[in-house]
Amino acid sequence: MRLKNRLAIVTGGSSGIGRAIALALSNEGAHVIVADIDESPRRGKYHEKSTTTPTVDEISKSGGQGTFMQCDMSDENSIRKLVDKTVKKHNRVDILVNNAGICFNRNSQETTTEDFDNLVDINLRGVFLATKYAVPHIKKSETGRIINIASVHAFHGGGGPAYAASKAGVVNLTKDTALELAPHGGTVNAICPGYIETAIQDELTEQDIKDSIEKTPLPRLGLPKDIGLAALFLASDDAEWITGISLIVDGGMLAPLPVV
Ligand code: NDP
């Protein structure tokens, strides 16, 4: 058990990538706080069509320990309460996975100011706030870890001004927090997934999905567990000297030269 006696918070843990991360960490002994707006998993039109069981029930079935806590990552008070309640109950935070996020791909003319603010509030400001409130506790852990879920869209245009900017922000926030936590022995890393089979892909057309598979050297969509296992590695002692990186998990999608 690589994460025995560790307490992990996974935001957006009810569905998709967050759910796979929560399961991967709990399978290795971590007690996982599944933080989300709703305990029911999100069901998509392409993927996760028949996923209905709450993540904590899946964790229990596998013999692990998990607790659901309601939290809205766009609301500072809700995030502060999530960390306070966790520490009150468990007296520690060892691992924070900032995974909750939303996505839409509209250009600058189609994106309203409210759309932009709402996305950035969840995808970037929420990561900052969860970090801000969790860091004092993670500093006390001998194995402190923050893992931020960014995207391949952090590095290139094409994801729309709100999503692409929010994920680029997460990559640089990761490096900055890595410097803050390093003197306390903790690590902070990002994972940049390619196209993963979750309900967030409802935003895409079937043609978008076909194109993304064709552009992936390992020609399939990613599975949530591909990201879950990468997060498990970064959370484990095996990754104790890795900090400030953005680990691209995309089946090779970003590997080719953009123009050949
Ligand atoms: P899903 O939509 O499947 O899951 C996202 C989860 O986050 C849902 O449970 C959702 O809840 C929750 N959530 C959304 N808004 C909030 C909020 N304000 N407060 C708390 N929880 C919230 O998406 P993925 O699992 O695919 O996405 C997880 C992360 O991975 C995101 O940050 C996304 O940007 C990133 N990512 C995903 C990729 C992909 O192809 N799937 C590729 C690259 C990055 P609810 O159902 O109630 O909305």
Image (cartoon, grey):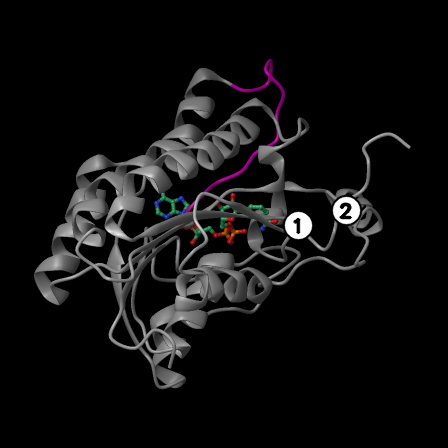
Q: Is residue 182 above or below residue 225?
A: above
Q: Position of residue 22 (x, y in %)?
A: 40, 66
Callout 2 amino acid: Ser
Q: Which residue is mark 1?
A: 195
* Residue at the (65%, 48%) spot, across then down: 194
Q: Position of residue 87 (x, y in %)?
A: 13, 58
Between the C-alphas of marks 1 and 2, the distance is: 7 Å
Look at the numbered disc 2 and give the secondary structure of its residue: helix
Q: Which residue is mark 2?
A: 212
Quadrant of the rendered image containing residue 76: top left
Q: Earlier in the sequence, mark 1 or mark 2?
A: 1
Mark 1 and mark 2 residues within 8 Å of each other at the beta carbon: yes
Q: Position of residue 71 (x, y in %)?
A: 26, 49
Foreground of the two, 60 or 3: 3
Q: Position of residue 59 (x, y in %)?
A: 37, 77
Q: Is residue 42 visible to the viewer in this orientation of the structure?
A: no
Disc 1 within 8 angstroms of ligand 1 (CB): yes
Q: In this rendering, would 122 be left or right of 218?
A: left
Q: Is residue 111 above or below residue 49?
A: above
Q: Is residue 125 above or below residue 3?
A: above
Q: In this rendering, would 219 be left or right of 19?
A: right
Query: What's the magenta region?
Result: 100-111
